[in-house]
Image (tube, rainbow, N blue to C red):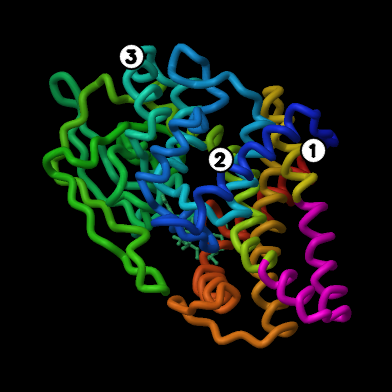
Amino acid sequence: MKIPTVQFTEEQEKFRIEVRTFLQSHMNQGPFKAKCDSWLSGCDPSFSKLIAEQGWIGMTWPKEYGGAERSTIDRYILTEEFLAAGAPVAAHWFADRQTGPLLLRFGTEEQRQFFLPKITKGECFFGIGLSEPNSGSDLASVSTRAEKVDGGWVVNGAKTWTSNAHDAHYMVTLVRTEPFDGEKKHKGLSQLIIDLHAEGVSITPIKYLTGERHFNDVFFENVFVPDSMVVGTLGNGWAQGLAELAFERSGPERILSTFPLLNELVAELKEGGDVAGLAEASKLIAEMWSLRNLSIGVAKVLEEGGEVAIPAALVKSIGTKFEQKIPEVARLLVQTFPRLDAERKLDRYMAESILHSPGFTIRGGTSEVLYGIVAKGVVAG
Ligand SMILES: Cc1cc2nc3c(=O)[nH]c(=O)nc-3n(C[C@H](O)[C@H](O)[C@H](O)COP(=O)(O)OP(=O)(O)OC[C@H]3O[C@@H](n4cnc5c(N)ncnc54)[C@H](O)[C@@H]3O)c2cc1C
């Protein structure tokens, strides 16, 4: 497993400053408030629209689909700056991170022409329809089924924990298009794009620990999906879905969900001249730096079309534990009064971090499952 070291060019450093300047002038002013875990819970379509106007959604995609043909490393820099600032980027997150690359790789020309320009304009958001009430880690056991009818498919079943389904327009949904074969359960799965406003779709909230509406149950009752909304090859949904996971698991969002808290902690320690506290906080920064280098290296390998399933699982499993550690260390170094409506940023970020943390090591694949992937890969390799 060779992970390259990435040195940023002068142009890339300039781009970082451009993004940072943009965020400084828009964040914490008017409606846009910084928060921890903003990539999942900071859902604000108007902010996404603003980002789109900068050409920053789908920025690596071909120009003919509304992209800017920038590099993966540019996108990495952009994402890091969004997360560090706690910017509300959740509305377009999945479409930008997953759906676009999926359609570029497996979608039809018609799907690309239809969806990608809308995504890059910040006008079309996607949900990810994988988990079901009885299928989480054992995803291949999904039972939402699609039956063939004239001109399309009729879908029945349910998805759960679907982040931001209530704000999304469509969902890439893993369904069974062939009868379940217990011996070969990975077979006969397909990915369908389902219009979340179609007849027969109902979406009900599952409240987060914070009380926010974040994820949902999504039910399908005889929902018609036209043939043109099948992604890639029928029956190849498992392999296509796996290709998406590397994008999902290795990004800076697996390290930086509680970064605004770390930043605020360091500021407070500096202000109070707490040298011993700063020495403790610096250990977190050193850890973050190593994880970040791993994550950027994986981004580079992904850009070059390399295989990254194992290092991506490493980034996700170690990175999310790190994100959880930040509030644990912070509470030992400074006195806080965690409250979601607190005026003092440190108190608010602390509350958000504590209440969001349990999900970090579950979403996108639990740590135990990722350890299994790493262990099996290393043994096989
Ligand atoms: C904040 C958040 C957002 C989410 N958003 C989405 C979304 O948008 N779309 C979506 O489809 N899903 C989403 N999920 C669901 C998430 O992907 C699942 O919760 C996750 O895959 C685990 O599945 P499960 O909850 O069914 O737990 P289970 O799979 O039932 O696991 C229960 C426990 O058993 C352990 N376990 C299971 N299998 C193994 C094994 N083989 N080896 C060792 N241990 C094992 C697990 O580690 C876990 O501790 C989200 C979850 C969270 C927390």
Give the quarter of the image for residue 344. bottom right
Sort mark 1 into few (<14), some (14-19) or many (20+) by Cα contacts within 10 Å: few
Q: Is residue 328 magenta?
A: no
Q: Which residue is mark 3?
A: 110
Label number found at residue 381: 1
Main secondary structure along the magenta-highlighted residues: helix
The answer to whether residue 94 is left or right of residue 177 is: right
N-term-proximal mark, 1 vs 2: 2
What quarter of the picture does the C terminus occupy?
top right
Kindly report the distance in space between the C-alpha atoms of the residues bearing marks 1 and 2: 20 Å
Residue 129 horizontal/vertical position (percent): 37, 45
Q: Residue at x 36, y 58 (%)?
A: 215
The quadrant in which residue 326 appears is: bottom right
**Residue 346: image location, x then y, percent:** 60, 75
Q: Nearer the viewer, residue 308 or 331?
A: 331
- Report if residue 2 is visible in the image: no
Q: Which mark is residue 245?
A: 2
Question: Which amino acid, by three-letter code, is at mark 2?
Answer: Leu
Residue 41 badge = none
Badge 3 vs badge 2, beta-carbon distance below 8 Å? no
Front position among marks 1 and 2: 2
Disc 1 marks which amino acid?
A: Gly
Q: CA distance from mark 3 to mark 2?
A: 24 Å
